[in-house]
């Protein structure tokens, strides 16, 4: 019998997805201004650009998106929320979770050779250097801790990748849109209407995004950080919304305010990787202090 289990590991490492993001959104390119979203003059231009990225993508990246778009259905996300969001995995402090994530045996990033822990520290250090508030620095430090899902056996396509609303039509501006053909939701007329399960302007809090490391960590730390930091954590992979400005009709005024913070965070996530490795032991006291201020003790994961 042929196995229906998808190949769990098409990417050599999780950074391959992030490297692809950097190719699509080179440093310094502005996000789509909201005024252009409904302009009819160049609707094909953006899609054409996406098609080019798709053609040039590494086969591993392509396969990763194929699996992601095939299996990230509304029901899949519901099942994962049920499994994970009761937070019954072993309790850990934030620092312990950082060390746990660092055990991820993932071929190292060929470009920077940075560990997961070093990516988190680099992100936080750049935010700190720019003089942002302490909660913002902490957000940078922890934003990818949800990737420990990989260590609980989740395949890459269920941990990373651009996130997008499920339960309503998939935006044409989601990269590798054609792979949604194999998603069971594509055969559900309710899920493929523009609004699907949602009311206009209902707010993202009522919208289910595809499952991944953002949503998991958000649930671990919610109520413990300012809303701006929580939005950065929850939506940082939602490129269709924060970068492409799609799904405007689902957002409320508070979401639009918070998206500006997500956009402010994004460059720290994408463009601050460097070969200069942070000195973990030297930085640790500062960050333990910061963790204790907002997220003391063991958290439920
Ligand atoms: Fe991330
Ligand atoms: Fe990140």
Image (cartoon, rainbow, N blue to C red):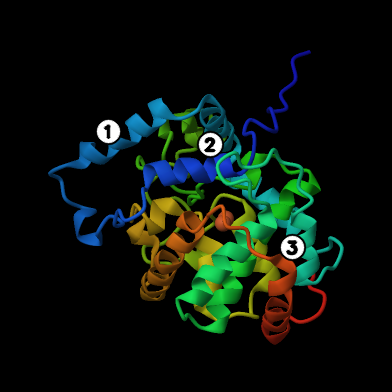
Q: Nearer the viewer, mark 2 or mark 1?
A: 1
User: For the residues marked 2 and 3, what is the alpha-carbon distance in whole angstroms?
Assistant: 29 Å
Q: Could you tell whether 123 is left or right of 147 in the image? A: left
Q: Earlier in the sequence, mark 3 or mark 1?
A: 1
Q: In which of the image's four quarters is ligand 2 placed?
A: bottom right
Along the viewing direction, whichever of 241 and 201 lies nearer the viewer: 241
**Crowding at label 3, few (<14), some or many (≥20) Cα neighbours within 10 Å?**
many
Question: Residue extending furthest left?
Answer: 41
Q: Is residue 160 above or below residue 87?
A: above
Q: Secondary structure at mark 2?
A: helix
What's the mark number on residue 258? none
Q: Which residue is mark 1?
A: 48
Q: Earlier in the sequence, mark 2 or mark 3?
A: 2
Q: Earlier in the sequence, mark 2 or mark 1?
A: 1
Visible residue check, residue 230: yes
Residue 69 is marked as: 2
Quadrant for the N terminus in the image: top right
User: Which numbered circle lies on residue 98?
Assistant: 3
Q: Position of residue 81 (x, y in %)?
A: 69, 56
Total number of numbered labels? Answer: 3
Task: Estimate the x, y position of residue 199 in percent, counting from the top left.
Answer: 41, 62
Q: CA distance from mark 3 to mark 1?
A: 39 Å
Place residue 135 in its image quadrant: bottom right
Instruction: Look at 40% across and 30% down and name the residue there.
Output: 54
């Amino acid at each position: 019998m042929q196995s229906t289990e998808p190949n769990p590991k098409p990417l050599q490492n999780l950074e391959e997805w992030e490297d692809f993001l950097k190719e699509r959104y080179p440093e310094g390119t502005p996000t789509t201004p909201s005024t252009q979203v409904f302009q009819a003059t160049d609707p094909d231009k953006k899609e054409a650009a996406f098609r080019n990225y798709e053609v040039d993508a590494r086969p591993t990246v392509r396969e990763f998106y194929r699996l992601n778009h095939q299996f990230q259905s509304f029901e899949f996300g519901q099942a994962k929320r049920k499994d994970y969001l009761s937070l019954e995995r072993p309790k850990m402090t934030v620092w312990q979770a950082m060390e746990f994530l660092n055990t991820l045996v993932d071929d190292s990033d060929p470009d920077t050779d940075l560990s997961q822990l070093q990516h988190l520290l680099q992100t936080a250090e750049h935010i700190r250097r720019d003089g942002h508030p302490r909660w913002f620095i902490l957000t940078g430090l922890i934003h990818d801790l949800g990737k420990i899902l990989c260590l609980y056996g989740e395949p890459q396509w269920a941990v990373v990748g651009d996130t997008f609303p499920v339960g309503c039509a998939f935006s044409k501006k989601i990269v590798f849109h054609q792979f949604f053909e194999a998603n069971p939701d594509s055969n559900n007329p309710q899920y493929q209407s523009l609004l699907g399960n949602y009311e206009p302007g209902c707010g993202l809090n009522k919208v289910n995004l595809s499952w991944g490391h953002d949503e998991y960590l958000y649930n671990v730390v919610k109520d413990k950080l300012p809303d701006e930091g929580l939005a950065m954590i929850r939506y940082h992979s939602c490129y269709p919304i924060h970068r492409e400005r799609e799904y405007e009709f689902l957002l409320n005024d508070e979401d639009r305010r918070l998206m500006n913070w997500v956009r402010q965070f994004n460059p720290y996530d994408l463009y601050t990787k460097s070969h200069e490795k942070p000195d973990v032991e030297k930085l640790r006291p500062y960050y333990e202090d910061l963790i204790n201020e907002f997220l003391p003790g063991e958290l439920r994961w």
